[in-house]
Image (spheres, helix red, strand yellow):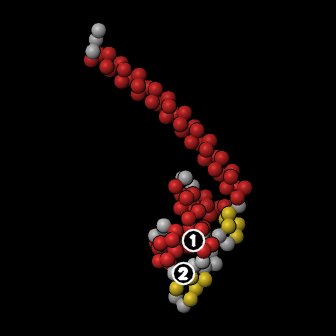
């Protein structure tokens, strides 16, 4: 399939697919003349790249996980996701503290506006 078809089936733009290829995320793409020819495995891998990006995994991080043609080191991927979960937990705790302070300030301001 040509780039338009893989874009349609994967939900990625042709520009994004070319970027993935230039970064070495999509490798060994067959060519027919000037045209790239993609297969179902490429569609699945582009979807994986997009899903990883929605989780906050950078293209650079994905590149470091590559081991062979459109294949990741899954053990390293698990480690990366565990690290991401730890960061999310830390951020959630920080946001909870910030929320508590905002609620305290709001309460203090309301008391000043409505003294009893």
Q: What element does badge 2 sit on?
A: loop
Q: Residue at x 70, y 58 (%)?
A: 74
Q: Residue 28, how many percent across, how many down?
A: 64, 78
Is 112 situated above or below 80? above
Label 2 neighbour load within 10 Å: few <14, some 14-19, many 20+: some
Q: Residue 62, how many percent across, how many down?
A: 61, 61
Extreme right residue here? 75
**Whether residue 16 can be seen here:** no
73 sits to left or right of 62: right
Q: Residue 73, how many percent across, how many down?
A: 71, 61
Q: Residue 59, how many percent across, how many down?
A: 56, 61
Q: Residue at x 49, y 77 (%)?
A: 5
Q: What element does badge 1 sit on?
A: helix
**Whether residue 54 can be seen here:** yes
The answer to whether the residue labelled 1 contacts the one labelled 2, judged by CB atoms less than 8 Å apart, is yes
Count how many numbered circles sit on residues in the image. Answer: 2
Between disc 1 and disc 2, whose residue precedes? 2
Query: Label 2, on which residue?
Result: 1
Query: Label 1, on which residue?
Result: 43
Out of 94 and 75, give the one closest to the viewer.
Answer: 75
Q: Residue at x 65, y 51 (%)?
A: 80
């Amino acid at each position: 399939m040509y780039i338009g078809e893989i874009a349609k089936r994967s939900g990625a733009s042709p520009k994004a697919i070319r970027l993935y290829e230039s970064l070495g995320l999509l490798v060994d793409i067959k060519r027919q003349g000037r045209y790239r020819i993609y297969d179902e495995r490429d569609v699945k891998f582009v979807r994986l790249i997009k899903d990883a990006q929605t989780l906050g995994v950078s293209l650079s991080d994905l590149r470091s996980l590559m081991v062979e043609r459109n294949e990741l080191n899954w053990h390293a991927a698990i480690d990366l996701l565990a690290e991401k979960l730890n960061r999310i937990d830390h951020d959630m705790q920080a946001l909870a503290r910030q929320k508590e302070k905002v609620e305290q300030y709001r309460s203090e301001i309301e008391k000043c506006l409505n003294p009893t």
